[in-house]
Amino acid sequence: MEGEVTKATGLLYSVGMDLLLLLKIIGILVAAWLVERLIYFGLRRAYAKSKAKGREEMTRYRFFRNGVRTLVVILAMVAIVYTVPSLRALAFTLFAGAGILAVVIGFAAQKALSDIISGIFIVAFRPFRVGDMIQAGEAGVFGTVEDINLRHTTILTFENRRLVIPNSILSEDRIINSTIRDEKTCEFIEFELAQHADVNMAMALMQHQAMLHPDRIPSPETTTTMEAPDETITVRLVKIHEGAITLRMYVWAKDPVTARRMHYDLNQAVLESCLENHIPFALPIRRSIQTDHTRPNP
């Protein structure tokens, strides 16, 4: 009888200890959530009260918010490991052999640390901001910067896809920022015509179609060096090559997205106009060499 009482007492004690340990873990998670919410609302309130609500402030706000969230999660995990005796003993055992473990962790965290430092540099020096339209690298796609955190930057592309790029790659790559200072965009629209085409008529048709487009805006005072200051729409012959000539038209729009859409519209309009006026487009020239391998070489 006494043995059964002792077993029941031990069972209740172990259940009580497990329940107490579970309550401690729940308390840590709730406290971490409350701290994260308080800091989040504090940052949001500070951003709402700031006088200049531009893209720089939004970039800093997003970066700090994501950083605080990551830091709170790490601290909560450390607190849970310290609270659970078995996990704490395991952690002490692992750190006892800190020589090999430190090397392993160092190699594993090298890339993550590089991304974090690069993210801090991006926020500090502002090569791009949340809301800017950028292109990362020569072959990269255009998109709008949607978010930036400690590890990576999220770019929303025209196809409504999200491109996630590590911060260390962005900090080392060449970035084309279309909206960092002024969103007005000079769009280069090129057409390849046959060498015997009427160049002057083609230029006049291109200028006429560009003037009719509703999204075209007047050239700003600080135009590009390739534009003629006395012309509303500048068209230049930029290349003469085998069997073709290339005409380039400089047309301005209010932002990069509108400029790209205007580009596509003018492609169709100029094509139809040139076909109506019998202006020939360039055709590719191919030369083929046929060798008779059945005859012996002299």
Image (tube, rainbow, N blue to C red):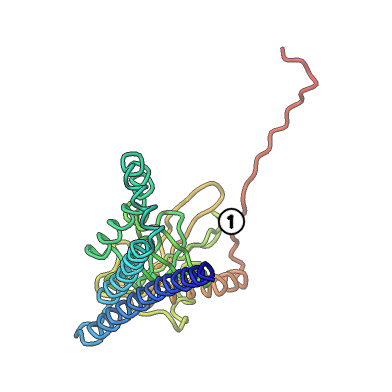
- The quadrant the C terminus occupies is top right
In the picture of the structure, the residue carrying the numbered disc 1 is: 282
Q: Quadrant of residue 270?
A: bottom right
Query: In the picture provided, is 113 more to the left or to the right than 189?
Result: left
**Disc 1 marks which amino acid?**
Ala
The picture places residue 93, in percent across and down from the top left corner, at 36, 48
Question: Left of 233 or right of it: where is 163?
Answer: right
Q: Nearer the viewer, residue 84 or 278?
A: 84
As drawn, the residue found furthest toward the right would be 294
Asked if residue 205 shows in the view, the reply is no
Q: Where is residue 67 in the image (x, y as percent from the top left)?
A: 31, 68
Quadrant of the image for the N terminus?
A: bottom right
* Residue 236 vertical position relative to residue 132 in the rendered view, above or below: above
- At a point 28% along the width and 69% down the height, the residue shown is 223
**Along the line of sight, the residue nearer the viewer: 206 or 145:** 145
Percent coordinates x, y for residue 116 in the rendering: 31, 58
Please determine whether, in this image, residue 286 is positioned above or below residue 279.
above
Judged from this view, the residue extending furthest toward the top is 298
Q: Residue at position x 33%, y 75% from top?
A: 32
Q: What element carries label 1?
A: loop
